[in-house]
Image (tube, rainbow, N blue to C red):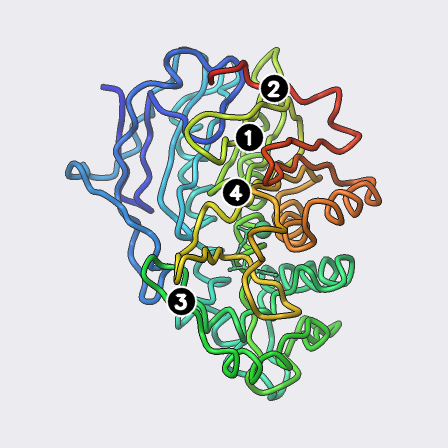
């Protein structure tokens, strides 16, 4: 049997299947039949863009060992945070597959936990309570939400507000589902004064508040990366240091695949396959692009990254097709990736070059691929025709 479905968090273990991430020595087994997916427990207000097909009934949960693939890895995936999360875990010689499976299950449950507290789309999440208290007294925050907000303010400052989680006062007016229409300029103008990351006030006692009534934080550009980092930390804590955790284009690469380095592919924006790959160890790679979520209206395309200065989505003509950022962790890579997309290809690459901890691969509208100086020797382009 090639696959096993675990009801908890809709987790699927599979002997097949790798999607966006092309991993070290990916052989024929890695491009085999797509695995079945099952829905996680559905929450009210979860991202409506998520469409999940249920192809077969899930068997009951048990502690059975997951299948180990020919290359010595366990692979599992689950639909979470409005996207697909996957874990590829190298089973060190002598390690038990059932223990690996148990660690993977815990790591997926950790992503589910982060989603439950940091999603602006879940009415009862801690973030929604934080937003609802805007303009009021500071409230006690969980260490996770405090950490995400704190990191958000640091990155907002470093990027002069190109990444700004308070964009959500306006982001809330936009839907990017096919068939959506833009909000009016009047509606945007009315909310623009509420977009200001300096209004996220955090104190030394672990409390926080939003300065003005009506301010709202959305963590769509950072929470996924944080969840990837937490899941990877959990696997390391269980002694599984060699793995890749990926969620909707946010990847953390931990350790190696036995003797070899993990290779991580960068998705081709115009179709299946990759433009190339990087070998990474204990680093994150995050890719973001307007092609992932957008709607068209009156012949114009509106994609899901918003310029916090205007409240409008990035102008297609001036923006990159796709931005990939390499950083020390997926939290940083995620947020900086969105910021570099907002800055545009030229300013974005200059910013990356000014930051020793960041590297970038930017696909420009002309199709040209720009690499930051630290990647020129390490990027392996995909062979033509792939
Ligand atoms: P990513 O795919 O990581 O670039 O994140 C895109 C998501 O981040 C969007 O779907 C929004 O939820 C959120 N977002 C959009 N624009 C911004 C921005 N300028 N700063 C922070 N978050 C943003
Ligand atoms: Mg991001």
Q: Position of residue 141 (x, y in %)?
A: 59, 70
Q: Position of residue 239 (x, y in %)?
A: 57, 30
The image quadrant where one finds the N terminus is top left
Q: Secondary structure at mark 2?
A: strand
Image depth: mark 2 or mark 3 in front: 2
Which numbered disc flags the more N-terminal residue, 1 or 3? 3
Q: Which residue is mark 1?
A: 266
Ranked by sequence position, the earlier of labels 2 and 3 is 3
Corner quadrant of residue 178? bottom left
Q: Quadrant of residue 203?
A: bottom right
Kindly tell me whether mark 2's CB lies below 8 Å from ligand 1: no
Q: Earlier in the sequence, mark 1 or mark 4?
A: 4
Q: Earlier in the sequence, mark 1 or mark 2?
A: 1
Of residues 103 and 255, the one nearer the viewer is 255
Classify 283 as above or below 224. Answer: above
Say few, some or many: other residues with alpha carbon within 10 Å of mark 2 (under 14 / 14 to 19 / 20 or more): few
Q: Which label number is shown at residue 231?
A: 4
Q: Nearer the viewer, mark 3 or mark 4?
A: 3
Q: Work out how far the residue at label 2 is from the one at label 4, CA to CA, in angstroms.
A: 29 Å
**Label 2, label 3: how many angstroms apart (C-alpha)?**
40 Å
């Amino acid at each position: 049997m090639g696959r096993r479905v675990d009801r908890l968090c809709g987790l699927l273990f599979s002997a097949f299947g790798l999607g966006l991430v092309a991993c070290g020595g990916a052989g024929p087994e890695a491009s085999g039949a797509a695995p079945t997916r099952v829905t996680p427990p559905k929450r009210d207000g979860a991202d409506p863009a998520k469409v999940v097909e249920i192809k077969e009934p899930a068997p009951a949960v048990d502690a059975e060992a997951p299948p180990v693939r020919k290359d010595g890895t366990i692979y599992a995936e689950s639909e979470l945070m409005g996207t697909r999360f996957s874990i590829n875990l190298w089973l060190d010689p002598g390690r038990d597959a059932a223990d690996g499976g148990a660690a993977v299950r815990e790591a997926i449950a950790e992503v589910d936990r982060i989603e439950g507290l940091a999603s602006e789309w879940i009415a009862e999440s801690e973030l929604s309570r934080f937003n609802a208290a805007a303009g009021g007294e500071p409230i006690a925050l969980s260490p996770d939400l405090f950490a995400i907000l704190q990191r958000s303010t640091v990155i907002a400052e470093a990027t002069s507000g190109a990444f700004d989680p308070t964009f959500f006062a306006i982001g809330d007016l936009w839907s990017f589902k096919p068939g959506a229409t833009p909000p009016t300029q009047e509606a945007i103008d009315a909310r623009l004064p509420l977009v200001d990351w300096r209004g996220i006030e955090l104190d030394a006692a672990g409390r926080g508040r939003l300065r003005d009534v009506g301010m709202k934080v959305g963590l769509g550009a950072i929470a996924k990366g944080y969840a990837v980092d937490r899941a990877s930390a959990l696997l390391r804590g269980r002694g599984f240091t060699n793995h890749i955790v990926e969620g909707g284009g946010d990847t953390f690469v931990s350790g190696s695949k036995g003797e070899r380095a993990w290779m991580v592919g960068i998705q081709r924006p115009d179709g299946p396959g990759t433009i190339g790959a990087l070998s990474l160890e204990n680093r994150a790679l995050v890719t973001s692009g307007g092609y992932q979520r957008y709607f068209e209206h009156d012949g114009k395309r509106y994609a899901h990254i918003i310029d916090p200065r205007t409240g409008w989505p990035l102008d297609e003509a001036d923006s990159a097709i796709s931005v990939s950022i390499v950083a020390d962790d997926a939290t940083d890579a995620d947020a900086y990736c969105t910021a570099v997309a907002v800055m545009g290809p030229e300013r974005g690459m200059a910013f990356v070059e000014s930051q020793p901890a960041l590297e970038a691969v930017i696909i420009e509208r002309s199709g040209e691929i720009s690499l930051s100086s630290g990647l020129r020797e390490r990027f392996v382009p995909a062979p033509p025709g792939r």
